[in-house]
Amino acid sequence: MWIRGLKYRGSEGNVMKQDSIAIIYDFDGTLTPKTMQEYTLLPRLGIKSKNFWADIVRETKKTGAETMMVYMRHLLDCAAEKHVSISKTEFLKMSKDIEYYNGVSSWFDRVNQYVNCTSNSKIKIYHYIISAGHLEILEGISIKKYIKKIFASEYYYNKDNIAVFPKIVVTDTTKTQYLFRINKGKENLSDSINEHMAEIKRPIPFDNMIYIGDGLTDVPSMALIKKEGGHSIAVYQNNKTQIKISEGLLKANRVDFIAPADFSERSKLYKNMQYLLDYVIAKIKYRLKLKS
Ligand SMILES: [Mg+2]
């Protein structure tokens, strides 16, 4: 009988192994101190961040609408008012202005090297981003080369290449859809994920996943991964509100540990991540009977 994690034959008869780790990152507040819009679209459109978000929250509360839908429409309305056309090229150019937390630019190489050294290159490591923000901006970020796939909200563009309507809207709860896509290896959005797939046939089991987020919008993803035997981490900026949110997530067992959003080599986050990777690597080695 097969058990989870052992080799299995894929649909084309190839022998495959569940020997990959996925680290999945939220973006805004997790890798960057501010939301991506605050570095890009809001200054470009001359919008004051506080008022803009307050208007969205007000409308969402009043109408019961989905926050992301309200946000994407407000942004198009503001652009139209200011006679600014938002094109894909314009979006891409904006991503250069995004600022990251300390250590983010070297994090991915360090983590990859750590997994390769610890597992004698027998275990693969992949990084993903799942964000409610704009795919068009994320496609241009400096760390994109380290990311296997980015899942995020996206506009539909008319024949003149101008954003006119939401095409994909990622919300707190729909983020979990993308975790299933990673889990089942159905990363193209046109692939259906509803068909049953035995646990042993899923390329990246949930317990090989580590999710990193910064707040309550990450709760559905953190909770799903934890419930399925995987791991979650909350990072926080050094202020009372953020620390309190992270502590709440830890208390409710939604995360394995919390740490300041410092990704540098000597940080608590990197140290604890190494311990966690040791654990996940050991689980995989045990299941696959890998000797190093
Ligand atoms: Mg966030």
Image (tube, helix red, strand yellow):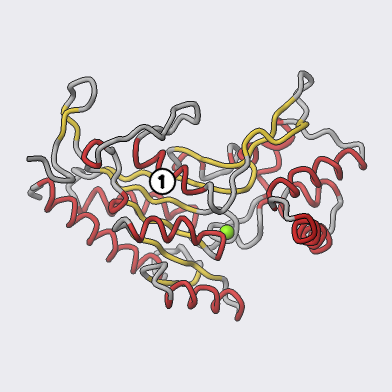
| Residue positioned 28% across, 53% down in the render | 207
Q: Amino acid at mark 1?
A: His
Number of on-image labels: 1
- Up the image or down, 238 lies above or below 83; here it is below
Q: Residues within 10 Å of mark 1 (few under 14, many from 20)?
A: many
Q: Locate residue 179, reporting x and y percent.
A: 42, 46
**Residue 82 vs residue 54: left or right?**
right
Give the residue drawn at x 92%, y 42%: 82
Q: Is residue 225 above or below residue 188?
A: below
Per the image, label 1 sits on a secondary structure element best described as strand
Q: Give the answer, above or below, for where 253 lies relative to 62.
A: below
> Residue at position x 89%, y 38% from top?
80
Give x and y (percent) for residue 97. 68, 49
Task: Choose between 61 and 241: the one closer to the eye.
Answer: 61
Q: At x 8% / y 48%, what residue is drawn? A: 289
The residue at label 1 has a CB less than 8 Å from ligand 1: no
Q: Is residue 128 above or below residue 62?
A: above
Q: Which quadrant holds the N terminus?
A: top left
Image quadrant in which you'd find residue 211: bottom left
Q: Quadrant of ligand 1?
A: bottom right
Taking depth in this image into account, of 62 and 257 the one nearest to the observer is 62
**Relative image position of residue 53 (x, y in whole percent):** 77, 59
- Would residue 284 appear left or right of 178 to someone viewing this image? left
Residue identifier under label 1: 127
x, y percent for residue 155: 69, 34
> Left or right: 292 with respect to 101?
left
